[in-house]
Image (cartoon, rainbow, N blue to C red):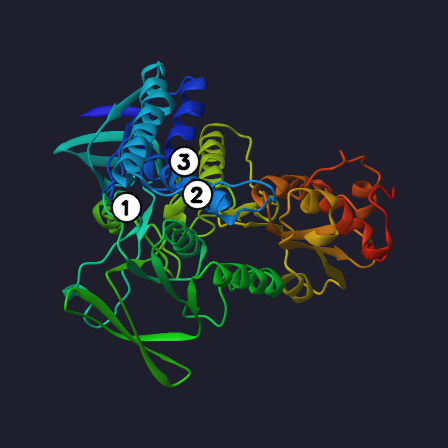
């Protein structure tokens, strides 16, 4: 039997952040790596089958699309895919090199941390079974992540379907694809494939894509995606999936009207499932939430004292940076008197479509639900000088403020580089800034970041009546 102060089950962002902090604190630690996500190796979902490979392929698709849009007059240029397998090989090289430099190499430098590439299961709340042997630990962190949820659809088990893992490793592009799910993952893959010349149909259960976002953001993004040729169908109830003549057929209903769609491939992007099957959590008494994810308190501790959990295995929001923050803070909470919580309200998130969408804080509806009298209004990118300069005026920003105090409660953006622009808003929400604080901060001209200042100014002026440099 091996004994440690700390056992970390997992090998992704949350697990590594925890290991780095544990090593810094001089805690004798073991990382036990494997989980149920098939393509996940050292480094977890993000580096192997998530953020890194998907954003590389999205970037390639966006680059291709930008060239072929022929945005600027007086120039002639065009591009096409010459060798798609080569694009995939370059992506795989990127993943491998980052796995080595950011995880394997880092792991080798940790003096107090041992890595075991095996599955772990609980014997009791302080004992793990790893490859037939027992490992005891005073404190344990569960950070096993999540994988694609396979919905219960009649006939789905009889057809070959794709998840994000297979979709990121295709050596040959299909002519057509059906994507089930209108959240972040579904939208990113829909546009990526569309930019690669694939005929895309996206089926969304809710009345709109990104249903939890501001309706204006969802609406405009949907219009932009449709303009690129993506067929988006909302309010969908899927009845059956079948295969005939080499094609996948999806039979579905839209408000009672029966419809069907056919394509060469089908991609599932309708949620995630926690990687908990092999953990034998029943031996610990750890409680799960209504969706089956591990339930934690604000200090990342489970219902069992001394057992913590972090990252996607705890449910939404599932963000790589948040998982790392949770792993770090969980370790501090486990081994010190100091207890640190994470303010989820100030954690930004983004969807890497083109244009991108990003958000932080409360929506108008959420703020009203908390009894806060809000003020909010969208400001369009067409009123931003830099947007006209780069000839991409698509997009808007919507800022929600407390009508009485002018404090910024939430911001959502759809537009060029929204994922970068959102961080000023994240700081505003985190540090309880007002619109006046933003207005009084000089912004570089001409930049896209001025959109945040325009949003703040809109509470005092009609933006269309202002010059480029108003205050």
Query: Disc 1 to disc 2, how far (Cα)?
Result: 23 Å
Question: Does residue 253 appear to the left or right of 391 in the view shown?
Answer: left
How would you rate the neighbour count of disc 1 (Cα within 10 Å): few for under 14, some for 14-19, many for 20 or more? many
- Vertical position of residue 188 compared to residue 372: above or below: above
Residue sitting at 28 percent across and 34 percent down? 86
Left or right of residue 406: residue 307: left
x%, y% of residue 165? 28, 46
Vertical order, 32 against 343 (above or below): above
Residue 132 in the image, given as x and y percentages of width and height: 12, 34
Distance between the alpha carbons at the discs numbered 1 and 3? 20 Å
Extreme residue in the left direction = 132
Near-viewer residue (103 or 378): 378
Distance (Cα) linking label 2 and label 3: 34 Å
Residue identified by numbered label 3:
14
SS class, disc 1: helix
Residue at the disc numbered 2: 64
Residue visible at 14% across and 65% down in the picture: 158
Quadrant, the C terminus = top right
Residue beneath disc 1 = 165
Label 2 SS: helix
Image quadrant assignment for residue 343: top right
Measured along the vertical axis of the image, is residue 363 above or below residue 47? Answer: below
Where on the picture, by quarter, is residue 221? bottom right
| Residue occupying image coordinates x 69% and y 42% | 389
Q: Quadrant of the N terminus?
A: top left
Within-10-Å neighbours for mark 2: few <14, some 14–19, many 20+? some
Look at the numbered discs 1 and 3 and tell me whether their residues touch, using CB distance below 8 Å: no
Compared across the picture, whether 249 is left or right of 387 comes to left
Element class at badge 3: helix
Q: Nearer the viewer, residue 142 or 35?
A: 35
């Amino acid at each position: 039997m091996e004994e440690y102060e700390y056992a970390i089950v997992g090998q992704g962002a949350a697990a590594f952040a925890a290991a780095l902090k544990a090593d810094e604190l001089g805690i004798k630690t073991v990382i036990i790596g494997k989980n149920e996500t098939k393509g996940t190796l050292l480094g977890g979902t993000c580096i192997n089958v998530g953020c890194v490979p998907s954003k590389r392929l999205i970037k390639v698709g966006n680059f291709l699309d930008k060239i072929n849009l022929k945005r600027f007059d007086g120039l002639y240029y065009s591009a096409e895919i010459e060798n798609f397998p080569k694009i995939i090989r370059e992506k795989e090289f990127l993943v491998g090199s980052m796995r080595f430099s950011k995880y394997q190499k880092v792991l080798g430098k940790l003096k107090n941390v041992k890595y075991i590439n095996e599955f772990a299961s609980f014997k009791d709340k302080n004992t793990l079974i790893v490859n037939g042997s027992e490992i005891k630990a005073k404190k344990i962190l569960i950070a096993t992540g999540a994988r694609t949820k396979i919905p219960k659809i009649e006939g789905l088990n009889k057809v070959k379907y794709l998840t994000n893992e297979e979709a990121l490793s295709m050596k040959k592009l299909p002519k057509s694809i059906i994507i089930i799910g209108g959240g972040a993952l579904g939208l990113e893959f829909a546009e990526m494939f569309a930019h690669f010349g694939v005929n895309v149909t996206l089926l969304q259960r809710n009345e709109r894509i990104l249903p939890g976002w501001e309706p204006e953001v969802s609406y405009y993004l949907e219009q932009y995606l449709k303009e690129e040729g993506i067929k988006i169908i909302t309010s969908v109830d899927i009845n059956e999936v079948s295969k005939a003549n080499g094609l996948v057929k999806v039979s579905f209903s839209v408000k009672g009207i029966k419809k069907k769609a056919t394509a060469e491939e089908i991609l599932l992007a309708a949620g995630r499932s926690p990687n908990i099957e092999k953990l034998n959590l029943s031996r610990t008494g750890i409680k799960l939430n209504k969706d089956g994810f591990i339930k934690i308190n604000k200090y990342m501790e489970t219902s069992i004292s001394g057992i913590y959990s972090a990252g996607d295995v705890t449910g939404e929001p599932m963000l790589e940076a948040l998982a790392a923050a949770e792993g770090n803070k969980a370790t501090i909470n486990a081994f010190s008197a100091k207890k640190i919580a994470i303010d989820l309200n100030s954690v930004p998130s983004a969807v890497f479509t083109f244009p991108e969408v990003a958000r932080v804080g409360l929506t108008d509806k959420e703020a009203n639900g908390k009894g806060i009298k809000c003020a909010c209004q969208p400001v369009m990118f067409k009123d931003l000088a830099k947007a006209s300069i780069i000839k991409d005026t698509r997009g808007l920003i919507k800022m929600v403020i407390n009508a009485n105090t002018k404090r910024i409660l939430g911001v959502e953006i759809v537009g060029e580089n929204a994922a970068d622009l959102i961080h000023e808003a994240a700081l505003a929400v985190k540090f309880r800034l007002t619109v006046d604080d933003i207005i009084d901060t000089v912004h570089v001209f001409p930049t896209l970041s001025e959109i945040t200042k325009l949003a703040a100014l809109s509470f005092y002026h009609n933006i269309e009546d202002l010059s480029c440099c108003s205050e």
